[in-house]
Amino acid sequence: MFPSQLPKPRHPAAAAIPSLRWAIIGPGWIAERFVKSLKELSRQRVVAVS
């Protein structure tokens, strides 16, 4: 059986996550959402798009 509710998402504190530099290949609509989430929830940086 599947649970009737999914658990709430957990986000670790941004300071607890090591900062990485990301490159995105083949950006589309999902890349925009991914980058937005990186900026809002962490200290990650997008440094290249191809």
Image (cartoon, grey):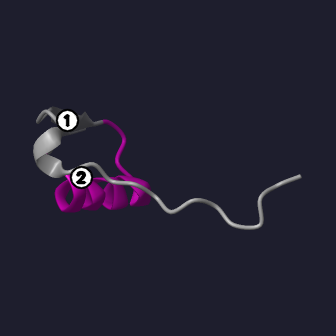
Quickly name the residue at label 1: 22
**Image-based side of 12 in relation to 3, left or right:** left
Q: Please tell me whether mark 2 or mark 1 is closer to you in this view.
A: 2
Task: Provide residue 7's location: percent of width, then percent of height.
Answer: 57, 59
Taking depth in this image into account, of 5 and 25 the one nearest to the observer is 5
Judged by its main secondary structure, the magenta piece is: helix
The part of the image, by quadrant, that contains residue 39 is: bottom left
Q: SS at mark 1?
A: strand
**Image-based side of 41 in relation to 44, left or right:** right
**Quarter placement of the C terminus:** top left
Taking depth in this image into account, of 6 and 47 the one nearest to the observer is 6
Q: Is residue 32 above or below residue 48?
A: below
Q: Is residue 30 above or below residue 5?
A: above
Q: Would residue 21 be counted in the magenta stretch?
A: no
Q: Which mark is residue 3?
A: none
In three-dimensional space, the C-alpha distance between marks 2 and 1, rounded to whole angstroms, equals 10 Å
**Image-based side of 2 in relation to 14, left or right:** right
Task: Provide residue 9's location: percent of width, then percent of height.
Answer: 46, 58
Q: SS at mark 2?
A: helix
Q: Amino acid at mark 2?
A: Leu
Q: Amino acid at mark 1?
A: Trp
Quickly name the residue at label 2: 38
Taking depth in this image into account, of 37 and 4 the one nearest to the observer is 4
Q: Which residue is drawn at the image coordinates 14% and 32% (left, top)?
A: 20
Q: Which residue is drawn at the image coordinates 34% and 48% (left, top)?
A: 27
Q: Would residue 28 be counted in the magenta stretch?
A: yes
- Looking at the rendering, the stretch of residues picked out in magenta corresponds to 25-43
Number of numbered tags placed on the structure image: 2
Task: Provide residue 34's location: percent of width, then percent of height.
Answer: 34, 54
Q: Which residue is drawn at the image coordinates 24% and 52% (left, top)?
A: 38
Badge 2 vs badge 1, beta-carbon distance below 8 Å = yes
